[in-house]
Image (tube, grey):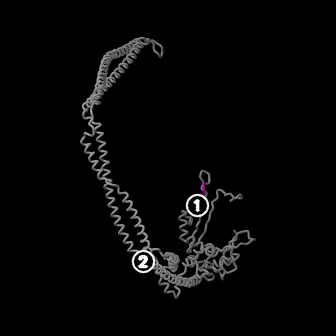
Amino acid sequence: MDGNNQPLKGLVTVVEAVIECDGKNHTLRKELHERVVKKQIRGYETVCKIDEVPKKIGEYNAYIAALIPEDTFKLLTDLNYFGGKMHWTDRRSVLLDMVSEIGTPDGFDELLDKLNDRTIDEYKKVLAGQKKGYEKERDEINPRIDELQKGLGGNGYVDKLDTEEIARERARLRTELVNLDTKRKELLGQEKQRQEAIEQIYILEKKKARREAELANDTSNVKKYLDEKNIAEVKVAKLKQQVIIEDSTFMYAQSNLGSLQVELEKVRQKFTALSEAEVTTNCYACGQKLPDDKLAENAEKRKAEIAEVVKKGNNLKAAIVDGKRVFKALNEELQQARARHNDAEAAKQKRFAEIDTAIAADEKTPPEKDSLWQALCFDIGKAANQIGVPVAESLEKIERERDSQQDYVTQLDKALAHADRIKQDKARIVELEEREKELAEKIAEIDGQLTCIDDYKTAESRLIEDKVNGMFKYVEFKLFDRLLNGGMSDCCEATLAGVPYSDMSAGQKIFAGIDIVNVLSEHYGISVPMFIDHAESLTLPIEADTQTIRLFAEKKTRTLIVEREGAYTHV
């Protein structure tokens, strides 16, 4: 950046490191170049090299990852990463992965036999779930017992009669109900027959009315007149159609004749124009007189055009003469067709008047003299005699009696059901009380197992902490918190001489970080340079098992000094 905090153009930023790995030096280099498009910076591109060989970014990162994964590199180079920056759950997971078999606390064989391939925590969750279910069921029992006891109150029928007497009375009433249902079905059958008879009368009345309409509209005596009218109508319609055809043909001939006359007039005008046209003897271009042969050629062309027009005019005249003859003949045929139609229409109207008079004078057969009508009247009277009296009143009386008996039976059913329910409720109360005792025993048994699990985890936590802390020279890790209720919760915090990592001084954190990195390097089987920042705050000895790079801050020093094995270089 320049003095105005703006990027300097044209620069190539380079980061390069020479790393010794397994006795061989390797140079890793990364360059950041400006990407210029049409003389404008459109971003940056990265150029990677390994031992001066260009590599793609993916190949470059894969090479480094093969030497040491990025997360492992952070653990082994940043003294504050594991103890301060890393989440405690990840820190705890790394430590537990580092320890080998921890062993099993003594005195818990019975508990371990119940695990069935489950972990202690999984088994504890199972027990907690079972306890929760048992407690929920237990808490629901007392309200249910109270509710059942409230329902044990007396009932009027139960207080006055014993259940056997109630059952006998109910059986008698049910027999009476069966008899009432039988009477009701018989009355309904009678009513059904009565309704069928009424329906039959309705059907016969409709047939009777239909027969009366047939007699009133009978045309058998005047059928010949009606047929004659139909024939006359058809004849007049055919003549009318012929008039329409003749009129259409006449109109077409008239239109064609007019077209011929118009065309003849055009031919006449063209003939007049050719006859009166001035004969040109000079050239239209240069104005000189045309040669005699050209004049003769033009005269022949004009003569031929006039002859063609005359021929066409004569043909049109002949066609017009013929068209007028046809027009006249078609006009005569049209007039004849119209006369035939008018005569037929007049004759039809005259004959229709005579036919209508004859039809009006026709006498209809009265229904009283018709045998079919008389038979229908007889059937109607016969069906009326079968109707009988309505059964609605009798049915209503039976329904009232039946409803009363049914209400009484319902009351008796409720009394017996209440008696049965009391017996069932008393038995259910005893059953619930037994279940409540059983649940209390199960909950107490689970509480004992949960207490045993807490004791096991306490003993196991001591084994784990002893195993983990045995790997470190100075640092100890607190892996469990003791809760007020006696339980245990997971945690992971480094301590130095009893001081938690969060409360350590800067020098203590560096000292503890060196101890942690030494153990992690041995665990991963990798040794990398250790960077010790703020080394000026460290007063404890450095006991690192690898190359250390210490950084000191000095107020009077303005030039970066790199010292190695007693020598130094100004940078």
Residue numbers of the magenta segment: 42-48
- Residue at far right of view: 556
For residue 321, which quarter of the picture?
top left
- Mark 1 burial class by Cα count in 10 Å: few <14, some 14-19, many 20+: some
Identify residue type, mark 1: Thr
> Considering the numbered disc 1 on the image, is that residue within a helix, a strand or a loop?
strand
Task: Note whether residue 342 is visible.
Answer: yes
Mark 2 / mark 1, whichever is N-terminal: 1
Residue 122 appears in view = no
**From what the image shows, is residue 370 above or below residue 523?**
above
Across and down, in percent, residue 281 comes to: 44, 11
Q: Residue at x 57, y 63 (%)?
A: 48
Residues at marks 2 and 1 touching, judged by CB atoms closer than 8 Å = no
Question: Where does the image place residue 412, in percent across and percent down from the top left?
Answer: 42, 71
Position of residue 116 measured from the top left corner of the image (x, y, whole percent) = 46, 81
In this rendering, which labeled residue sits more in front, label 2 or label 1?
2
**Principal secondary structure, stretch drawn in magenta:** strand
Whether 146 is among the magenta residues is no
Disc number placed over residue 162 in the picture, else none: 2
**In the image: residue 92, left or right of residue 402:** right
* Label 2 CA crowd tier, 10 Å (few <14, some 14–19, many 20+): few
- Tally the numbered discs: 2
Q: Which residue is mark 1?
A: 46
In three-dimensional space, the C-alpha distance between marks 2 and 1, rounded to whole angstroms, equals: 102 Å
Taking 2 as reference, is 368 above or below it? above
User: Residue 255: image x %, image y %?
Assistant: 36, 21
